[in-house]
Amino acid sequence: AQKVTQAQTEISVVEKEDVTLDCVYETRDTTYYLFWYKQPPSGELVFLIRRNSFDEQNEISGRYSWNFQKSTSSFNFTITASQVVDSAVYFCALSSGTYKYIFGTGTRLKVLA
Amino acid sequence: SQTIHQWPATLVQPVGSPLSLECTVEGTSNPNLYWYRQAAGRGLQLLFYSVGIGQISSEVPQNLSASRPQDRQFILSSKKLLLSDSGFYLCAWRPTGFLPGELFFGEGSRLTVL
């Protein structure tokens, strides 16, 4: 069975601190895709990144970076120099080429001014 | 460009009453459609998905049902709501195809059952 675990329920940081959100996944498939979404207080989910299982290169987009490690089945998300606008719930998700997308329980990030 | 809309945005219903949430996608054809529920502390739970008109796959046995009467319309229903049906319901779509691309989400519908 497929599973996504986000063990951090809530994280609070002070503005300008770096923060890493953890994501651990389980799947028996060799081809799969991993995603991160942001859910601001408005409620609508915003896509951040998609990664396939054959591409383990880390990715950086501005203050955001993602570390994909197949050896530990992890796909962690780091925000550098956090800002108040980063406050949101962040979801990690997994899909193995079927129609299903399995989401984790989310991590609520609070960035304090 | 493609857009997704769902309504109503907010709903307060008594226990035992019926439910109908509607989702419509514009600007694309034959999308894959999804209903998710977000309950407090439980993340996003996949309820139903559809790959075509009249084709519904149910993920969790529950008090809800889904229908797809038209290509870009996805409806979530219940004949009798339970307290446990309260939550934030999200409709999503993705282009048809094999590779799992980005899911595009609607604005959500917040349901409170009293």
Image (cartoon, rainbow, N blue to C red):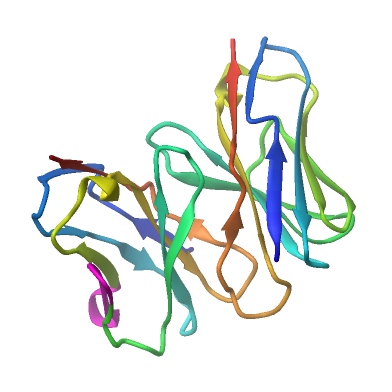
Residue at 67% across, 53% down: B34
Q: How far across and down, in percent of the image, does residue A85 sit?
A: 28, 47
> Does residue B9 lie above or below A51 as drawn?
above
Residue at 26% across, 42% down: A9
Which quadrant holds residue A67?
bottom left
Task: Give the left or right position of residue A112, taking residue B19 as reference.
Answer: left
Residue range highlighted in magenta: A61-73
Q: How far across and down, in percent of the image, does residue B21 sit?
A: 74, 34
> Does residue A94 lie above or below A40 as drawn?
below
Which quadrant holds residue B1?
bottom right
The one nearer the camera, B95 or A29, is B95
The one nearer the camera, A70 or A43, is A43
Q: How far across and down, in percent of the image, does residue B57 sit?
A: 74, 54
**For residue B74: magenta?**
no
The one nearer the camera, A64 or B42, is A64
Which quadrant holds residue B37?
top right
Task: Give the left or right position of residue B48, taking residue B105 as reference.
Answer: right
Residue at 60% across, 63% down: A100
> Does residue B87 lie above or below A21 as drawn?
above
Q: How far across and down, in percent of the image, does residue B89 sit?
A: 60, 37
Task: Give the left or right position of residue B106, taking residue B21 as reference.
Answer: left
Task: Give the left or right position of residue B7, taking residue A40 as reference.
Answer: right
Residue at 37% across, 35% down: B41
The one nearer the camera, A26 or A66, is A66
The C terminus of chain B lies in quadrant: top right
The mark tally for this picture is 0
